Image: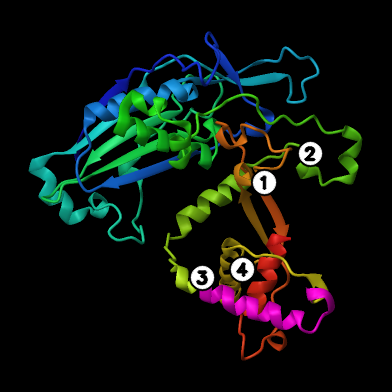
């Protein structure tokens, strides 16, 4: 067993660089309303963190991320024509304390626990393979995703590891309604900066902050989309314009997690370069037989490392006998075409769910007749990667 000390870190008044003074609530745009799930994050350290500095850093974080100490709420819409069923969703900026727990091993039981519980040893190697992150993640109230529940949306836990090596693990739990993975990552970068530099982190030169990946977070203006024209409904797939019951999908998702084991597949940059070279050899060979630099009648396009790895992963599953007909990509639009005039000025710093999922069908798996001894699998990888990129 561990000794768990619960602390509630006082939040600070929101910084005027983030929201206007006196702001009491922040609206949640329709496209950002994602109250399902949370984003758990862990960091391991060879030594011990300064608890006082960490507590202060969490408090400072609340000044530029006021939603993490607020509450998720729903109220009747002031707009009678609201397309979301007559409700507006928002963060009530309650400036509530942030849950922070410190977990210490009980010395008299350390030896027994270490023998039977390998969860004391996070990340035994750089493959990051272990049964669960649960010992290091602070739980959120099960109702945190329910509007008006009054539950905290963000929590922190510091766990000290037993044994002579010492060390510690910092775990956080970020309710998904607060923002996507990039917004969560940005918040953690600020937490680190506040831990290292205190309040002076906000006074750093703007160019230095950007070089360190830090932007002052923003909540407004959000990306707003007009309601769809009801007359377009019949011409579109209904699941794209109508609400659907996700119970069955979530049940399958949960069951998949229970019935499968996590593994880590690591590529070196050399291996990725080799994969790219073999795939591009096929592309160049195809271009030689088609006019105007085309492959199979298609203009050549630039494939990213992620496209190639996705093609490799799908091809691997197919070779193992699994049927894979479709794929889903999560696209982080914060980094797309930032210099384009249409790019929203604050999209990269927006504390919201900006990333969107894109679903597409994959080309059929090749038959044995389609394979050649000289390039087993590489043609399939190329076709899948190209399909994803297009």
Q: Which residue is mark 3?
A: 272
Q: Is residue 276 magenta?
A: yes
Neighbours of disc 2 within 10 Å: few (<14), some (14-19), many (20+): some
Q: Main secondary structure of the magenta part?
A: helix
Residue 306 picture quarter: bottom right
Neighbours of disc 3 within 10 Å: few (<14), some (14-19), many (20+): some
Mark 3 or 1, nearer chain start: 3
Mark 4 or 1, nearer chain start: 4
Q: Which residue is mark 4?
A: 311
At numbered mark 4, what does the secondary structure look like: helix, strand or loop?
helix
Q: CA distance from mark 1 to mark 2?
A: 27 Å
Describe the colour scheme in one phrase.
rainbow
Residue 256 is labelled as none
At numbered mark 2, what does the secondary structure look like: helix, strand or loop?
loop
Q: CA distance from mark 2 to mark 4?
A: 30 Å
- Looking at the picture, does residue 331 appear above or below residue 16? below
At numbered mark 1, what does the secondary structure look like: helix, strand or loop?
loop
Mark 4 or 3, nearer chain start: 3
Q: Which residue is mark 2?
A: 241
Q: Which residue is mark 1?
A: 337
Q: Is residue 389 left or right of residue 15?
A: right
Mark 2 or 4, nearer chain start: 2
Q: CA distance from mark 2 to mark 3?
A: 39 Å
Neighbours of disc 1 within 10 Å: few (<14), some (14-19), many (20+): few
């Amino acid at each position: 067993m561990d000794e768990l000390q619960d602390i509630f870190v006082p939040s600070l008044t929101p910084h005027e660089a983030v929201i206007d003074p006196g702001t009491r609530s922040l609206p949640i745009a329709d496209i950002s309303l994602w109250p399902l799930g949370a984003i758990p994050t862990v960091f391991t350290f060879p030594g011990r963190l300064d608890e006082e500095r960490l507590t202060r850093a969490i408090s400072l974080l609340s000044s530029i991320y006021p939603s993490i100490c607020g509450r998720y709420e729903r109220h009747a819409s002031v707009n009678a024509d609201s397309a979301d069923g007559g409700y507006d969703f928002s963060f009530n900026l309650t400036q509530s304390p942030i849950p922070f727990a410190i977990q210490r091993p009980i010395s008299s039981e350390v030896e027994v626990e270490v023998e039977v519980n390998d969860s004391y040893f996070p990340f035994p190697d750089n493959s990051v393979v272990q049964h669960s992150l649960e010992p290091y993640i602070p739980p959120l109230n099960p109702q945190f995703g329910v509007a008006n529940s009054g539950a905290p949306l963000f929590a922190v836990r510091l766990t000290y590891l037993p044994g002579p090596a010492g060390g510690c693990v910092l775990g956080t739990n970020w309710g998904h309604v607060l923002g996507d993975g990039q917004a969560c990552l940005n918040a953690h970068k600020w937490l680190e900066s506040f831990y290292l530099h205190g309040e002076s982190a906000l006074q750093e030169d703007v160019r230095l902050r950007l070089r360190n990946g830090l932007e002052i977070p923003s909540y407004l203006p959000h990306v707003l989309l007009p309601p769809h024209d009801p007359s377009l409904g019949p011409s579109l797939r209904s699941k794209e314009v109508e609400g659907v019951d996700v119970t069955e999908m979530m049940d399958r998702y949960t069951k998949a997690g229970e019935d499968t084991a996590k593994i880590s597949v690591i590529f070196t940059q050399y291996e990725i370069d080799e994969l790219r070279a073999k795939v591009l050899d096929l592309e160049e060979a195809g271009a030689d037989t088609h006019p105007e630099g085309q492959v199979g009648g298609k203009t050549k396009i630039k494939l990213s490392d992620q496209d190639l790895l996705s093609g490799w992963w799908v091809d691997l599953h197919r070779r193992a006998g699994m049927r894979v007909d479709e794929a889903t990509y999560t696209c982080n639009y914060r980094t797309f075409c930032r210099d384009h005039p249409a790019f929203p000025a604050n999209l990269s710093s927006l504390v919201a769910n900006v990333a969107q999922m894109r679903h597409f069908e994959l080309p059929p798996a090749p038959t044995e007749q389609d394979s050649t001894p000289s390039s087993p699998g590489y043609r399939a990888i190329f076709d899948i990667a190209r399909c994803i990129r297009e």
